């Protein structure tokens, strides 16, 4: 094991002891250390960090990749004073990708299309229930994948999401129709012993862990057929946009019901698992419906003030 690999292990251990998960960061840094091992020089330099950050991936991630190495370099510098800290401002800052807000009929079309896009009826049922749960709760992809059997309480109508982003655990209530759909899926899932013995609620055909790429492939096929994602495009509407859609649609329903949206926004933040309301703003896109409701509310307040 090289000194840089040892430094990376100690860095990850130290950061995780402070509560950071570092899943993406570890993957990036392992790749960077492997990149460094192929170079004659074993000292971490700014030039090598910039070279790695700007390779293999698209420009949208260059800034964040270099930022990941920059934090690691500060740690390494304490062990090796020759280490250089990569400067900031080398690449344009990573900008927020404009999320796609799905129309209700688009989500229905996705769920109807899945049986024709996967090999078996069981896979279609699993993917349909999984994506429907994401769409109706706004939970993160990883949160849905990591649900265990004990996390879904059919009697109380609750789902427990454990130790996710920011090490938060939360309990979210589900509509009775969602609970009934999940129970129906669970009965089918348990028809095979390997799946019945699987720890996760959403189990693969033989009880395996549900993989992102397995669901992403039929989703991508549907998105292209539906005309919302061009052939060969590497970016565009994605599964995570279901979370954005849930947040926006929730606000629109509150506006339509005449609710005080500003006072209820912390409820949405808690439901989504955010630490601060400002984190929820990230998911609120300026759709035509949302802008129309906000404009009406602003005009009503202005008239009242006058």
Image (tube, rainbow, N blue to C red):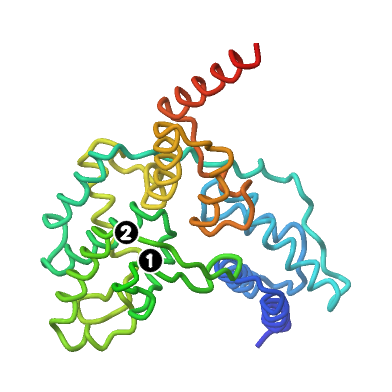
The residue at which mark 1 appears reads as 144
Q: Which residue is mark 2?
A: 133
- Coordinates of residue 107 in the picture (x, y in percent): 26, 45
Which element carries disc 1, helix, strand or loop? helix
State which tag comes first along the sequence, 1 or 2: 2
Q: Is residue 229 above or below residue 145?
A: above
- Viewed as shown, does residue 109 lie left or right of 216? left
How many marks are shown on the rendered structure? 2
Most foreground residue, 169 or 134: 169
Asked if disc 1 and disc 2 are in contact, CB closer than 8 Å, the reply is: yes
Looking at the image, residue 103 sits to the left or right of residue 19; the answer is left
Taking depth in this image into account, of 80 and 300 the one nearest to the observer is: 300
* Quadrant of the frame with the N terminus: bottom right
Query: Quarter of the image holding residue 43?
Result: bottom right
Q: Residue at x 39, y 40 (%)?
A: 249
Mark 2: give few (<14), some (14-19) or many (20+) Cα within 10 Å: many
Disc number for residue 262: none
The correct choice, above or below, for 279 with respect to 103 in the image is: below
- The residue lying at 67 percent from left, 56 percent from top is 66
For the point 52% across and 53% down, which residue is it? 57
């Amino acid at each position: 094991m090289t000194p840089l690999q040892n430094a990376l292990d100690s860095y990850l251990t130290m950061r995780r002891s402070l509560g950071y998960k570092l899943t993406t960061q570890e993957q990036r840094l392992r790749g960077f250390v492997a990149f460094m091992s192929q170079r004659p020089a074993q000292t971490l330099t700014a030039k090598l960090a910039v070279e790695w950050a700007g390779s293999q991936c698209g420009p949208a991630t260059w800034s964040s990749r270099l930022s990941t190495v920059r934090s690691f370099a500060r740690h390494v510098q304490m062990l090796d004073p020759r280490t250089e800290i990569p400067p900031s401002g080398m690449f344009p800052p990573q900008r927020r990708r404009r999320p796609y807000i799905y129309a209700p009929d688009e989500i229905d079309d996705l769920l109807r299309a899945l049986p024709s896009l996967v090999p078996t009826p069981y896979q279609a049922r699993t993917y349909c229930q999984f994506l429907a749960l994401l769409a109706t709760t706004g939970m993160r992809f990883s949160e849905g994948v990591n649900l265990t059997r004990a996390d879904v309480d059919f009697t109380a109508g609750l789902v427990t999401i454990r130790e996710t982003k920011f090490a938060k655990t939360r309990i979210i209530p589900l509509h009775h129709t969602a609970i009934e759909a999940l129970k129906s899926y669970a009965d089918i899932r348990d028809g095979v012993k390997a799946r019945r013995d699987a720890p996760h609620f959403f189990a693969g055909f033989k009880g395996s862990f549900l993989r992102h790429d397995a669901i992403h492939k039929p989703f991508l096929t549907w998105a292209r057929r539906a005309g919302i994602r061009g052939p060969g495009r590497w970016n565009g509407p994605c599964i995570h946009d279901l979370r954005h859609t849930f947040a926006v649609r929730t606000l629109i329903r509150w506006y339509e019901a005449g609710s005080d949206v500003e006072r209820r926004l912390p409820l949405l933040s808690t439901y989504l698992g955010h630490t601060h309301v400002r984190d929820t703003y990230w998911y609120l896109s300026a759709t035509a419906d949302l802008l129309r409701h906000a404009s009406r509310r602003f005009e009503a307040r202005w008239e009242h003030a006058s």
